[in-house]
Image: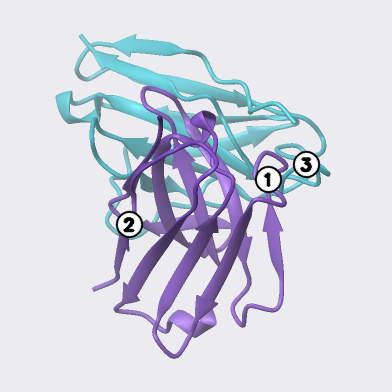
């Protein structure tokens, strides 16, 4: 059974940093591209970032470019999102998602990040 | 890059059919067959319902179907059931310079 379990969310002050993790199991993690998608309270889904299967290629939404860094450790079956210079507008539930055939076929349960003083 | 355009809400009675549209541009929906649809119940993670425009993942009811014409994709749910009440999002790959994947704003489906 495919499982994605996010962790690392919490309350952080504006300008602060946080690192999210996504532990994967039930599939060959190293074979799949992975994404982070976020959802602000009461709002829709927004794509954040993508990493290819071996970690050699990444992509970011303009809204987080230069502040967030996506990475992965295929030996630990874990995806990461390092978030720096956090802003109030980064407050959201962050989901990691596995991709296949150009879609997100499995999602984690999400981890809430709240940026507030 | 704006989100793909979806109606904010749709409604239907049990047993009826509804269609949710998702309008983009030639840089996303119209240019690629990487259009997918997701169902999200309150407080839950999204669930893949349709991928590559019209394909259903294993385990998804055949009451759900997808199509595309030009820059507009559509999700049709036939034989509406109470458990279909949820938010629905479309998504597409995009050649935009500002992001790689784009979602629609979401549609709230109410089963009357």
Q: Colour of chain A?
A: purple
For the residues bearing labels 2 and 3, Cβ distance under 8 angstroms = no
Q: CA distance from mark 1 to mark 2?
A: 20 Å
Q: Are marks 3 and 1 in contact (CB under 8 Å)?
A: yes
Q: Is residue A71 left or right of residue A75?
A: right
Colour approach in the figure = by chain
Determine the residue positioned at 50% across, 36% down: A14
Residue indicated by mark 2:
A108
Give the letter of the cyan chain.
Answer: B
* Res. B7 in view: yes
The answer to whether residue B25 is above or below residue A33 is above
**Residue at position x 64%, y 35% in the image:** B68
Per the image, the residue denoted by label 1 is: A61
Q: Position of residue A55 (x, y in %)?
A: 63, 78
Tell me the element at label 1. loop
Q: Which quarter of the picture shows residue A15? A: top right
Q: Where is the C terminus of chain A found, in terms of image quarters? A: top left
Are the residues under badges 3 and 1 in a single subunit? no
N-terminal label among 1 and 2? 1
In terms of secondary structure, where does tag 2 sit? loop
From the top left corner, tell me how far across and down residue B10 is, in percent.
39, 12
CA–CA distance in space, label 2 to label 3: 25 Å
The residue that mark 3 highlights is B98
Q: Which quadrant is the N terminus of chain A positioned in? A: bottom left
Q: Nearer the viewer, residue A43 or B54?
A: A43
Chain label for disc 2? A
């Amino acid at each position: 059974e495919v499982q994605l379990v996010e962790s690392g969310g919490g309350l952080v002050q504006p300008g602060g940093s946080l690192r999210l993790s996504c532990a994967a199991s039930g599939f060959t993690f190293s074979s799949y591209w992975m994404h982070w998608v976020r959802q602000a309270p009461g709002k829709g889904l927004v794509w954040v970032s993508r990493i290819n299967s071996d970690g050699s290629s990444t992509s970011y939404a303009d809204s987080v470019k230069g502040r967030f860094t996506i990475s992965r450790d295929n030996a630990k079956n874990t995806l990461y999102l390092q978030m720096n210079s956090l802003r109030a507008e980064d407050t959201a539930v962050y989901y990691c998602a596995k991709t296949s055939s150009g879609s997100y076929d499995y999602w984690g349960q999400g981890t809430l990040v709240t940026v507030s003083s | 890059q704006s989100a793909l355009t979806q109606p904010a809400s749709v409604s239907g009675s049990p047993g009826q059919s509804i269609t949710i549209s998702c309008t983009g541009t030639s840089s996303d929906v119209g240019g690629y067959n990487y259009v997918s649809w997701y169902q999200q119940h309150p407080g839950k993670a999204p669930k893949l319902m349709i991928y590559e425009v019209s394909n259903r993942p294993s385990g998804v009811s055949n009451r759900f179907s997808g199509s595309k014409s030009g820059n507009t994709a559509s999700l049709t749910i036939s034989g509406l059931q109470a458990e279909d009440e949820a938010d629905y999002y479309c998504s597409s790959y995009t050649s935009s310079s500002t992001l790689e994947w784009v979602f629609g704003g979401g549609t709230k489906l109410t089963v009357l």
